[in-house]
Image (cartoon, grey):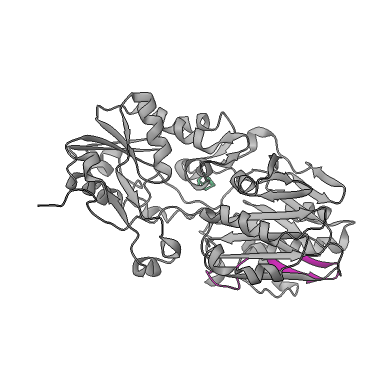
Amino acid sequence: MKKPGVHQQMEVEEKLREECGVFGMYDLDGKDVAASIYYGLFALQHRGQESCGIAVSETNGPKGKVTSYKGMGLVNEVFTGDELERMKGDIGVGHVRYSTAGASTRENAQPLVLNYVKGTLALAHNGNLINAPELRKELAYSGAIFQTTIDSEVVAYHIARERVKTKNVESAVLNAMKKIRGAYSLVIMSPRKLIGARDPYGFKPLCIGRRDNAYIITSETCALETLGAEYIRDVEPGEVVTITKDGIKSDTSMCLPKEQQARCIFEYIYFARPDSHIDGVSVYGSRIKAGRFLAMDSPVEADIVVGVPESGNAAAMGYAMESGIPYGTAFVKNSYVGRTFIKPKQSTRESSVKIKLNVLREAVAGKRVIMIDDSIVRGTTSDRIVKMLRDAGAREVHMRVSSPPFLWPCYFGTDVPAREQLIAYNRSVEEIRQMIGADSLGYLQIDRLKELVNGLDICQGCFTGKYPMEPPEDDIRGEYEK
Ligand code: SF4
């Protein structure tokens, strides 16, 4: 007989991965910022767990002096108290990384620090450029020597080159933005300025905050909360903000009409932390809405609604609110999963220590269960989760997914696998239901996506194959390693 209580363990399916998180800070009172950047990165750890780094400088010190440190691993593994103590500077940028373009190595960790005639530039980038291979080739033929295989270096080079011709660094950033195409949220440190830039489509989030007399530019508002900083506003898609001793300056000359903007909807569905707000929309609120829509559009009679942790939980709550079916907890996740969870190469994933998810038998035995997850990518775990619930005594298992079926790759920094590996490719919902062994299966409808974000303009390329800009002909991910 099976023991009551915690029931069974399994390896969690590799989820989609976000590429990076960025954090920049400038303390106008001259206080050191490294420790605050560390805490900021810690709050952004969910955006990338392979490598991280911090670069700081003193705005009153010699122009070319930057202290930087980066390494493979989680923020609290890479940095020690001594390391942070050594990093003196009132301006700095930091980065957490998961790689989709460029190998997972220490050289490819960010921030990138570049020395050039105008001093130094440190840059942290979130996103993927679609024309990086061409730009890189162009630069290489004109004599550039690359130290990394990441497209962020292409951005840094372009800014440095433009800077020689322009009156200030923010104009150089704007000129570089005219050449690079794709998704990018950047924080850049020049000797005397902190700059934030968001691509004209606004794929990736970027926001501005302030604590006392220190300004912050970062990927998510949760990092501001962690530092006790006040949220000022989001950086507009296409906007370049410059923070100097005189405060914030803005340039919106690269902004597109609103209807051309294309925020990655997956930030709301899965990537971002639920306590963040992006462009004025609560991530948690949009997940609750997704659950409500699932309850409206794919209703089913059941005894309990449960979420697959973590991002399925809010959607499950929304489903429960809308349907009146009680919300419950069916899964216990091991919180100490660490780095083994994220290694991007298939082989390392397979050899990694198993990630553990347990089912609470008491919660589901004898019940008709609605289980909500944020996505089904390859489908390799959904069937196991369904089976776990059944083995724990669930009478029926109905799966609801808080995103539409994935059918197309992403070129903008999300690690969607090749089409052939996507379970929804060439299969009907009924066929997928049979494969995962659920009693019923329902996905979020595509026309609900915009409603999740109060009508903001979004990218939905991985669901529809219609991208906000012409995608490259080939899959460019990992191009430089080929
Ligand atoms: S294709 Fe999908 S994952 Fe990629 S940016 Fe667009 S919505 Fe996000």
Residue at 15% of width from left, 52% of height from top? 3
Q: In the rendered structure, does residue 261 fall within the stretch colored magenta?
A: no
Q: x, y percentage for residue 13?
A: 35, 55
Is 438 on the left-hand or right-hand side of 252?
A: left
Q: Nearer the viewer, residue 57 or 236?
A: 57
Q: Nearer the viewer, residue 246 or 155?
A: 246
Q: Position of residue 26 (x, y in %)?
A: 77, 54
| Residue 343 location (% of width, % of height) | 44, 65
Horizontal side, residue 223 vs residue 350: left or right: right
Res 166 visible:
yes
Identify the image quadrant of residue 169. Answer: bottom right
Residue at x 45%, y 48% (from the top left corner) = 408
Front residue of 360/388: it is 360
The magenta stretch spans which residues?
Answer: 103-121
Task: State which quadrant residue 277 falls in.
Answer: top right
Q: Quick check: 127 above or below 455? A: below
Residue at far right of view: 167
Camera-side residue of 406 and 400: 400
What residue is drawn where x is 54% and y is 41%?
A: 275
Q: Position of residue 89 (x, y in %)?
A: 77, 64
The reply to whether residue 157 is in sight is no
